Image (spheres, grey):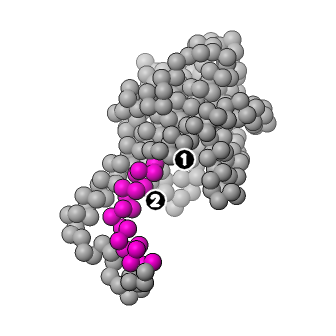
Amino acid sequence: MEHPIFKKIENSKAPDFGDIFNKSFEMYKKVFTQGLIHVLVSLVVVIPFILVVYIPLMPFYMDALSGGYDPYYSNSPFDQYSPIILIVWILFILVLSFIMQAVNYSIYGNFMKVLKNEDLGITEDTGGYFAIFKKHFSKLVMLTLATMGIALLAALLCYIPLLYAIVPLQLILPIFVFNEEMSVGDIVKAAFKLGNKYWFVIFGLLFVAGLLGSLGAILCYIGMIATVFFTYIVLYYIYKETVGFDDTDSISNIGQSEEI
C-alpha cells in the first residue's frame, strides 16, 4: 500500500520563495542558540573523525614542514605501507564516514524536530541529539549509502545529473525525520517525487540559503558555526509548506487540497 505522503505531494502547491525566506529568518532568530548547539555537537562528532583520518599522515606533514619531505622528489608517503594495510585503512575511513553521516542525520534531524516545536508552539519530545541514531541506526546507514551512491553515480555522469540530484537528496532528511516509519526506498522515492515537482523553486531556495549559510566564512570560517544551520530551517519550511504534518493539520497543512 502506497504511503500517504505520495498523495500529499501530488496535492501540494508550490512553496512560495519569499514567504519561506521570511519565515526562515524569523525562525533563525528564535532558535539561534539551539542551532548553534546542534552545530557544535556535530563538530564534536566530525573532529575526532578528521583526527583519525589524518593522524597516520602526521609524520609526513611534519617532515614537509621541516623540509625533510619534498613531494616532487620523494616517494609517496603511502609507499612504505603494504597494500593490505592501505586497503584496511581506506575501508576503515569509509565505515567511519557512514557512521559520521548517520550521526549528523540524527543531530540535524533532532534540530528539525526542535523547529517544529518552536514553529507550531507544541512540546513534542524530540528525544535528544542521538535518539534517531539509536532508534534507526540501520535505516540511517542505508540512507547514507543511498545518498552517497546516488551522488557518486550522478557525478560520474559528467556532473550535470549531480546538479539535478542535489535537490531531492537534500529533501531526504526532512522526509525521513517526519516519517520515520517509511522504508528507505519510499523515503528516496518521495524525495525525488517532491524534488521533481518543484525543482527550480527548491533549488533556488537551497542555493540562496547555502550562500547565506556560508557567510560565516568571512570570519575565517569560525562564523559559519552561527550560520550553517540556516539551510536546515529552509528545508523545514519547504517540507511544511508542501507535505505538512498530519497531527497539526489545522496549522501546518498549507498547500494541501484534502485531508489524508
Question: Magenta segment: does it hold 85?
Answer: no
Q: Secondary structure at mark 2?
A: helix
* Crowding at mark 2 (Cα within 10 Å: few <14, some 14-19, many 20+): few
Amino acid type shown at disc 2: Leu
Which residue position holds label 2?
156
Query: Which quadrant: the C terminus?
Result: top right
Q: Position of residue 57 (x, y in %)?
A: 36, 67
Q: Is residue 258 left or right of residue 5?
A: right
- Mainly helix, strand or loop, the magenta region? helix
Callout 1: SS? helix
Residue in front for this viewpoint, 250 or 105: 105
In depth, the one of 218 and 120 nearer the eye is: 218
* Residue depicted at x 57% and y 37%: 37
Residue under label 1:
165
- Residue placed at 24% from the left, 70% from the top? 81
Furthest toward the front, the residue is 66
Query: In terms of depth relative to the viewer, which is nearer, 153 or 148?
Result: 148
Residue 50 highlighted magenta (yes or no): yes
Disc 2 versus disc 1: distance between alpha carbons? 12 Å
Mark with earlier residue (2, 1):
2
Q: Which residues are magenta?
A: 46-65
Instruction: Give the residue type at disc 1.
Output: Ala
* Residue 238 visible within the image: no
